[in-house]
Image (cartoon, grey):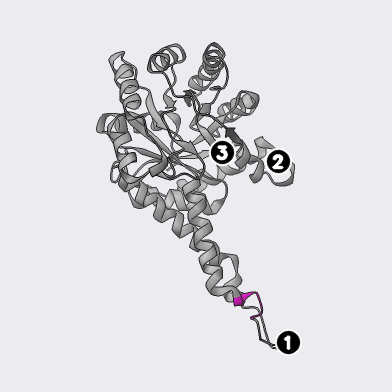
Amino acid sequence: MFFTGDQMKKVILKAKKEKFGIIASNVVFDTSVRAMVQGYNAMSADGLLQISSGACKYAAGGTKDLLVGAKFISDMVKNIANQYAKSGVGLNIDHGAPKDMDFIIHCIENGLVSTVMIDASHESFEDNVRLTKEVVAVAHKHGVLVEGEIGYIKGNEDELVSDSQLYTDPQEALEYVKKTNVDLFAASVGTNHGVTKGADVVLRLELIKEIDDLLNANGLDAGLVLHGASGLTVKQQQDAVANGVVKINKDTRYQMEIASAVQAYWEAEKDAIVCPSGTDENAYSPDKGRFDPRKWLIKGEDAMQSAVESLVEIVGAKDTSILL
């Protein structure tokens, strides 16, 4: 089922109360959307799919029209998600930048998304608050949730690039959430965007707990978000959830899964489209039964679905859907 913002709010509050995580998965094309939706449904867990501006440009084709791409992906997500009844998914704009404000507002006002992230973390604190409040005012009027961030995360993720890390200050986090009324808050606590290994990450769990404790003590129900989490170990993810994180973002992990699965297929089946060395080309014929894209794309889709199911299990979200 496709979830509205109000339904996603119920998921967030349940995760916060029961101490499990929501896996948020970036998607671009139908292969990834099906994999994620089917993975959540198989585990009876609610999830959140995410689109970036880069994903929308890709989906739009040669025009790179953000609005066309967002509509295309949103329709695809809704059509696929509404086939399933054991779990629900929402759709989020991930790392929406101030320069893309018109795009963010368009998606909100046209019912394309359930949540949006306004990432003004590279602006001054005052400008970040102002820009976030502008988005919240429009989003909440349309029943859409908002995620905000202060501090910033090192690494590369789609069109987001940062060469440095700025950890989130707990008191600033409290002030930011109070002033903006965001529903989700992304804290910079040591993770990196892109390809990372958990063993190389120093996760500042004390920051997570301090921020969560401060928000709770002040009657604020914003859920904490962990970006750049693809390379984290099982224990790091579980510790993050135990200390207050409710949403864990995943993107690079899925890219690696689909690439590895497709590469393995073609290493074994390359003679389906390439004449083997030593074979007479006049006697060779490509094998449509093996080079048909549906034969090898499904390998990547299955790998991504397995990854979703594993991640849901790790963060304790199995059999937690609000639809159960």
Report, in whole angstroms, how far the alpha carbon at label 2 lies from the one at label 1.
42 Å
Q: Mark 1 is on which residue type?
A: Asn
Q: Is residue 229 visible to us here?
A: yes
Q: Mark 2 is on which residue type?
A: Lys
| Residue 261 part of the magenta segment | no
* Other-residue count near label 1 (Cα within 10 Å), few / some / many at <14 / 14–19 / ≥20: few
Q: Quadrant of the C terminus?
A: top left
| Residue 272 part of the magenta segment | yes
Return the mark for residue 282: 1
Give the x, y percent position of residue 143.
Answer: 47, 25
Give the x, y percent position of residue 189.
Answer: 41, 29
Give the answer, above or below, for where 188 lies relative to 23.
above
Give the SS element for disc 3: strand
* Other-residue count near label 3 (Cα within 10 Å), few / some / many at <14 / 14–19 / ≥20: some
> Which residue corresponds to the image point at 40% horizontal and 32% vertical from the top-left?
8
User: Which circle, 3 or 2, is nearer the viewer?
Assistant: 3
Instruction: List the residue tagged with mark 2.
Output: 64
The secondary structure making up most of the magenta span is: loop
- Mark 2 in CB contact with mark 1 (< 8 angstroms): no
The range drawn in magenta is 271-276
Give the SS element for disc 2: loop
Q: Is residue 321 visible to us here?
A: no
Give the x, y percent position of residue 14.
Answer: 30, 32
Instruction: List the residue tagged with mark 3.
Output: 156
Give the answer, above or below, for where 105 lies relative to 34.
above
Report, in whole angstroms, how far the alpha carbon at label 3 lies from the one at label 2.
21 Å
